[in-house]
Amino acid sequence: MTKDSIIKSTLKGLNNARRNYDKWIGGECCRIPEYVNTVEIAREVTRNENIYTSLEENPQETIKTLKGEMRGRKSELSRLDGRFDIVVWNTRRPIGIIEVKKTQHGSVEINKDAERIFSVLDKADKLTWGLIAYSMLIYDGVRKPGISSLNERTENIKNKVNELAENRGFQVARYKSNAKFFGEGTEWSAAWRAEVLEIRK
């Protein structure tokens, strides 16, 4: 299925961003800027057959391309200001959107990203899914290893988005890469993982 392949490609893109950025800086950093994540995700997604991407797209223009109706109050439409990080296309039209975050370190503000996805899915009937892609790095604590905190915090993020989605009539699914561990046995030991939240009608 195309969407499943795109989700796998998104996770791979986040992993590629981490590896490539480490090469650039000559070490292990994991503080990958958003634009690096965005470019690597787009690169991987377009490896799928007959799938294309465009970056920094205006949401209202995306809806017009789909010939969706701009329904709703002005306050609702204002959520469509700004840009979508990635719009995914087949050979004819947009089929999905991807919002990308920089590497997170314990908390992540994705409510606005989720609301923008809800709004555009409401307005464009032919658009049925959107993704929020991010990675998270958590250092080991005195009482708790980083991987435990990573698991808890990413699950909490998913639950918060799921609560927002249910109130709007959407569903949320979570996908994740294998965890990677850095600096094991040192005071800088940490756990890192790529995460994707799928919002769908």
Image (cartoon, rainbow, N blue to C red):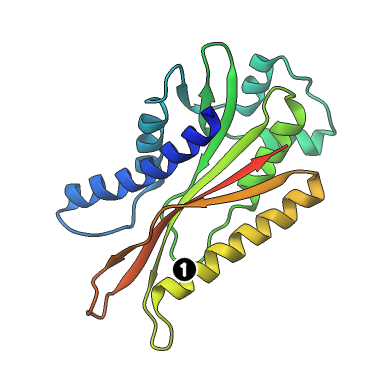
Query: Quick one: quadrant of the C terminus?
Result: top right
Q: Residues within 10 Å of mark 1 (few under 14, many from 20)?
A: many
Residue, far bottom: 143
Residue 144 rendering spot, x and y as whole percentages: 43, 83
Which residue sits at x=47%, y=48%? 101
- Image mark count: 1
Name above or below for residue 200 compared with residue 88: below
Residue 118 placement (x, y as % from top left): 71, 40
* Residue under the point 18% across and 52% down: 25
Q: In the picture provided, is 146 more to the left or to the right than 151?
A: left
Q: Residue at x 74, y 19 (%)?
A: 68
Residue at 40%, 58% (x, y): give it.
193
Q: Which residue is mark 1?
A: 150
Q: Is residue 18 left or right of residue 119?
A: left
Q: Quadrant of residue 8?
A: top left
Q: Amino acid at mark 1?
A: Leu
